[in-house]
Amino acid sequence: MNPQEYCNQVTKKSHSNFLSAFIFLPKNKKNALIALYAFCREIDDIVDESDEYEESKKKLNWWRLEIDQLFENKPQHQVTKALKPYVSKFNLSKPYFIEIIDGMEMDLNSNRYKDFKELQLYCYRAASTVGILSAHIFGYKDNATLKYAHNLGIALQLTNIIRDLGDDVKRNRIYIPLEELKKFNITESEILNFIQDKKMEDLVLDQAKRAIYFYKLALSNLPNIDKKNQKPGLIMANIYYALLSKIISNQPSNILNQKISLSKFEKFQITLCTLFNVNLINN
């Protein structure tokens, strides 16, 4: 199995929404994005699939060294070997890869966030960095597009946090800031015991409102000159915005006890609509 085949396999197993955005890309950009996604998956799995702190820390540090190797043209891992041809081709910057690892280390070191400032840093490291690297691969002419990618990453990660609230609680993780639980008079115990009530509904709707703000902020930053090249990111924006809308319309307090998703057909419809310049976020 060559490096790209390895990345293809990792990506295919994930059943991620990101795949819907890759379909219509040229082969080199598609392969670069798949390699980038496989890197994120490898890093994320270190924290998600191990309860051993020291072992996970050691593996993250190994990846820091491997990123050094990548940028010295001496990658050892299948994923970094797959990334190698695209580092210079798409001007991928080393600090963003390190930030992604830092984001996963935040998961390793903490399972609570005091306020939105702390959570926003996590969202930047876990998602905005990936969005900015992706924007480089898609291609852009105006630097404002990187600001769009930054804010879209925040919006996507906030949507993930809402969608995965129940799954995260099962792992004793609460990403909604503790300050905001207090604002809605919700205790950690109520979250951990999957209590569904009006307070929980109001909390979820408030979190969704923030995500919607970042979706709209992102789109306001995207220059017209780059909308065509950034179409895959817009597909992602529309898919995740539709997912968020579905959560809102399906009794939001239930999100602790059920996981809302979009069907393949719904994602295909949204992809086609986006390709024909239909923007769900402004509707």
Image (cartoon, rainbow, N blue to C red):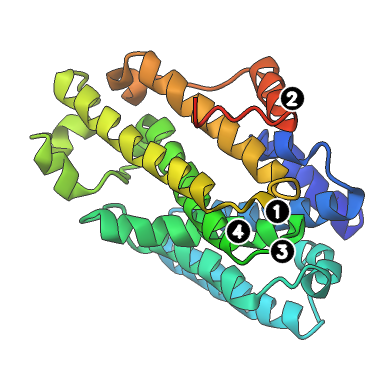
| Callout 4 secondary element | helix
Q: In this view, does 60 lie to the left or right of 51?
A: right
Q: Whole-Å distance between the Cαs marked 4 and 1?
A: 9 Å
Return the residue nearer the eye: 218 or 34: 218
Residue at 69 percent of width and 19 percent of height: 269
Q: What residue type is labelled 4?
A: Thr
Mark 3 to mark 4: distance in Å? 8 Å
The reply to whether the C-beta atoms of the residues labelled 3 and 4 are less than 8 Å apart is: yes
Q: Name the residue under label 4.
A: 145
Residue 272: assigned label: 2
The reply to whether residue 239 is visible in this rendering is yes
Residue 225: which numbered mark, if any? Answer: 1
Image height of 128 relative to 211, above or below: below
Outermost residue, bottom side: 72
Nearest to the observer: residue 142 or residue 162:
142
**Discs 1, 2 touching: Cβ within 8 Å:** no
Q: Name the residue under label 3.
A: 141
Q: Do the residues labelled 4 and 1 touch (CB within 8 Å)?
A: no
Left or right of residue 225, residue 107 in this image: left
Q: Earlier in the sequence, mark 4 or mark 1?
A: 4
Q: Do the residues labelled 1 and 3 touch (CB within 8 Å)?
A: yes
- Crowdedness near tag 4: few (<14), some (14–19) or many (≥20) residues, C-alpha within 10 Å: many
The residue lying furthest to the front in this view is 224
Residue type of the residue flagged with mark 2:
Leu
The picture quadrant where one finds residue 74 is bottom right
Q: Please tell me whether residue 141 is drawn above or below residue 138 in the rendered image.
A: below
For residue 268, side relative to residue 118 (left or right)? right
Three-letter residue code for mark 3: Lys
Alpha carbons under labels 1 and 3: distance apart: 7 Å
